[in-house]
């Protein structure tokens, strides 16, 4: 029996983790009380069974087995080195636990008997268990009173009292402890589990992260560095904690998750989801993140729909940016989300950028810095972590890194003066989290590798570059916070490098959290294997995990949480509250900017009794504008008509506007290269309106590049988004009920595009 057990246990190392199934043993039916402890220790790679799913929980644990469990838990690295001699005459080198007993002796975990024996195969007693564990974990006496009538004169009275005073062991109903009674394998696993969880709880309470990490397996530590999205399960969107999500959290020991629209139905549902997710997390809570930039990138269901970052840039008011961050944080916090992947600190200096555009505050580095810091501070005031993006800067690219590999060829002087400026300001302000960009910056790192996609030579993107993340960001800029990657599902990484190699490179470069790996289990195992092989030093992992734990503590994630009922009760007073909607409306109204006006100050005005034709690229957008126009102009006896403009609809639009008194041309350009956008159809309508000397307004709903690509606009405004607050503010300006007081946050340089 001993030989079989030794062979099985000998193959188990602390590297085990995700490979250990939660219910790995089939013979625990009569030991349900110990099932959690047995599975916990098995998952840690500390205990093992006899093969064929058998743990044999009721068998006595021997002294040799007990010290083996402790050695594998406490000194796994020493098992990789040559065995030292065990100084016991009854422990020959052929004993299956010879190495473990020798390590236990060396580290003072257990001692032998006066006659030089160890009695390795003798059953371990309850007294010896207390002695072994209190010595191994250097436990101090606790505050719980202990009254056990059969231990006063026993040799192990002191360790029994220490364990009992910390509620780690107890007696029987008759007031005895029965110190000389043997301990089963199930009992010993439970005792060890209690001690480890006790020590972890003490470390968390003391914020002693080094101590906590000493009780975390490698599997747990790399799990903290993964933040997947929440996938579908059984073909359905995940909106509740289903078995698939539970398995991911438990098997991969995840440190965080990111939520998307597919996971959200309404505020009550997402609050319940985040609450239930944290119940699965164990003693280390998860970061729950979301992209809530406002404007075009929004997730909060029924929440305050802020007009977006470029609208804030047009308003130019730091206090409003801070208010926007604060209310966003309040709503996210109420929903159970602690990380907001915002604000965007990219500088919108290239109209051909297909992905940033109005997600940026603007093209001026000082404006972006000022409003970015204000937004960060607002989020911080609400207890939500701002994860600024995309370092070192995604603003002046003409390639979407979701689809390909952008390369920014500016020299270092330009990077310092423009792209890096807002990030440097955020670092000086103490920003806690920063997202990397999948963009190559040859001026900082010109290393090339062979692409897996086509065999070409491609530069390393910032996410995988040690020179960018460790050298520039941490070294030169002095950043101390958490580095999170952009999504690993993006083609810039996945196509060129392969996910497993990219994960390894990113962590080696300095990334603390891998966001959205395509295969979370493979990413987890890749990091475990890299640590095991020495490719990634364990100190690298420790440094990242300590940053993560410190940040979770800083934002109160380890503090007791409210009940779900309490959370749901306050939702209605926070999500989309009257106060928040007021800020939303004020930002939208302050943002409206004049693109063109016949008098240089105002767009053409809609007048009483006008027949207004609304030309838009889609019916729903046109209906939204029509509804808002009727509501805001209810006192003007307006008549309205909708028409579509764009490919194949221009002739119909021309016919419709010929009968109008006033025309709204609703233009929307985003998520494509501006110079390749279909401006010609809009230009045709503008020329027809100018020729007839009609009143009209170009209503820019997206990136405000109309002055660059359209000519002879006599009347136009920009509202920086097609959401309800933005368009409502624009309609008010066209009705003369509001002045277009915003300032286009794009300089002349940005209107020319990149010349590098």
Image (cartoon, rainbow, N blue to C red):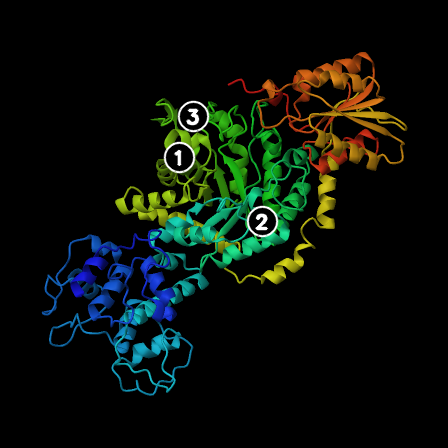
Q: Position of residue 366 (x, y in %)?
A: 60, 32
In the figure, 639 relative to 587: above or below? Answer: above
Between 200 and 4, the residue placed more toward the observer is 4
Q: Secondary structure at mark 3?
A: loop
Q: Report which residue position mark 3 lands on.
A: 443
Mark 1 to mark 2 CA distance (whole Å): 29 Å
Identified at 71% across, 29% down, the residue is: 619
Q: Report which residue position mark 2 lands on.
A: 380
Q: Secondary structure at mark 2?
A: helix
Which picture quadrant has residue 526?
Answer: top left
Disc with the residue nearer the chain's start (1 vs 2): 2
Which picture quadrant has residue 136?
Answer: bottom left
Cβ–Cβ below 8 Å for labels 1 and 3?
no
Residue 557 in view (yes/no): no
In the figure, 364 relative to 386: above or below? Answer: above
Disc with the residue nearer the chain's start (1 vs 3): 3
Q: Is residue 550 left or right of residue 650?
A: left
Q: Report which residue position mark 1 lands on.
A: 464
Q: Quadrant of the N terminus?
A: bottom left
């Amino acid at each position: 029996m001993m030989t079989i057990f030794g062979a099985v246990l000998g193959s188990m190392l602390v590297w085990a983790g995700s490979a250990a199934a939660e219910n790995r043993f089939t013979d625990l039916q009569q030991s349900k009380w110990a099932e959690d402890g047995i599975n916990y220790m098995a998952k840690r790679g500390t205990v093992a069974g006899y093969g064929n799913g058998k743990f044999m929980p009721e068998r006595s644990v021997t002294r040799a087995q007990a010290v083996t469990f402790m050695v594998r838990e406490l000194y796994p690295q020493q098992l990789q080195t040559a065995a030292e001699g065990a100084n016991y005459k009854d422990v020959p080198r052929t004993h299956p636990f010879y190495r473990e007993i020798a390590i236990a002796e060396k580290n003072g975990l257990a001692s032998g008997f006066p006659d030089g024996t160890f009695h390795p195969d003798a059953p371990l007693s309850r007294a010896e268990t207390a002695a072994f564990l209190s010595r191994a974990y250097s436990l101090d006496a606790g505050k719980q009173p202990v009254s056990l009538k059969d231990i006063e004169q026993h040799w192990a009275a002191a360790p029994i009292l220490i364990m009992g005073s910390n509620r780690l062991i107890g007696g029987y109903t008759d007031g005895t402890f029965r110190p000389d009674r043997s301990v089963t394998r199930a009992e010993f696993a439970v005792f060890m589990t209690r001690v480890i969880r006790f020590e972890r709880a003490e470390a968390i309470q003391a914020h002693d992260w080094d101590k906590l990490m000493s009780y975390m397996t490698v599997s747990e530590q790399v799990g903290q560095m993964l933040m997947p999205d929440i996938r579908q399960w059984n073909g359905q969107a995940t909106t509740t904690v289903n078995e698939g999500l539970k398995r991911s959290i438990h098997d991969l020991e995840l440190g965080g998750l990111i939520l998307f629209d597919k996971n959200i139905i309404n505020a009550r549902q997402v609050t319940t989801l985040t609450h239930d997710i944290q119940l699965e997390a164990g003693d280390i809570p998860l970061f729950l993140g979301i992209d809530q930039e406002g404007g075009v990138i929004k997730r909060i269901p029924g929440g305050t729909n802020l007009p977006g970052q470029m609208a804030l840039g047009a308003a130019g008011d730091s206090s409003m940016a801070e208010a926007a961050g604060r209310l966003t944080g309040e709503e996210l916090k109420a929903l159970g989300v602690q990380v907001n992947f915002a604000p965007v600190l990219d500088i919108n200096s290239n109209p051909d950028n297909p992905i940033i555009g109005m997600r940026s505050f603007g093209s001026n580095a000082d404006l972006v810095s000022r409003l970015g810091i204000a937004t960060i501070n607002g989020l911080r005031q609400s207890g939500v972590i701002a994860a600024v993006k995309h370092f070192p800067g995604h603003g002046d690219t003409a390639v979407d890194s979701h689809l390909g590999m952008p390369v920014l060829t500016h020299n270092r002087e330009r990077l310092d003066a423009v792209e890096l400026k807002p990030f440097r300001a955020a670092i000086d302000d103490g920003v806690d989290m920063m997202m990397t960009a999948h963009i190559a910056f040859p001026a900082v790192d010109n290393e090339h590798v062979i692409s897996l996609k086509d065999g070409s030579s491609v530069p390393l993107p910032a996410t995988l570059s040690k020179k960018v993340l460790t050298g520039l960001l941490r070294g030169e800029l002095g950043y101390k916070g958490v580095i999170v990657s952009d999504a690993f599902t993006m083609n810039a990484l996945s196509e060129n490098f392969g996910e497993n190699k990219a994960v390894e490179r990113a962590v080696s470069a300095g990334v603390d959290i891998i966001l959205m790996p395509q295969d979370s289990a493979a990413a987890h195992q890749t990091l475990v294997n890299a640590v095991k092989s020495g490719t990634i030093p364990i100190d690298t992992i420790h440094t990242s995990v300590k940053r993560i734990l410190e940040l979770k503590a800083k934002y109160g994630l380890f503090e007791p949480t409210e009940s779900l009922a309490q959370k749901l009760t306050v939702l209605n007073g926070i999500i989309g509250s009257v106060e928040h909607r007021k800020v939303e409306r004020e930002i939208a109204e302050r943002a409206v900017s004049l693109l063109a006006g016949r008098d240089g100050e105002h767009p053409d005005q809609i007048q009483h009794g006008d027949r207004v034709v609304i030309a838009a690229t889609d019916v729903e957008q046109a209906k939204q504008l029509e509804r808002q126009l009727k509501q805001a102009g209810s006192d003007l006896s307006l008549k309205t008509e909708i028409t579509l403009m764009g490919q194949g609809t221009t002739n119909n639009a021309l016919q419709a506007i010929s009968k109008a008194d006033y025309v709204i041309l609703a233009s929307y350009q985003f998520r494509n290269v501006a110079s390749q956008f279909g401006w010609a159809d809009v230009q045709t309508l503008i020329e027809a309106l100018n020729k007839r000397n009609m009143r009209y307004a170009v209503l820019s709903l997206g990136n405000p590049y109309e002055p660059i690509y359209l000519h002879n606009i006599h009347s136009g405004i920009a509202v920086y988004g097609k959401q309800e607050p933005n368009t409502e503010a624009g309609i008010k300006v066209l009705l003369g009920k509001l002045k277009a007081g915003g300032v286009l946050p794009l300089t002349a340089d940005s209107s020319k595009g990149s010349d590098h």
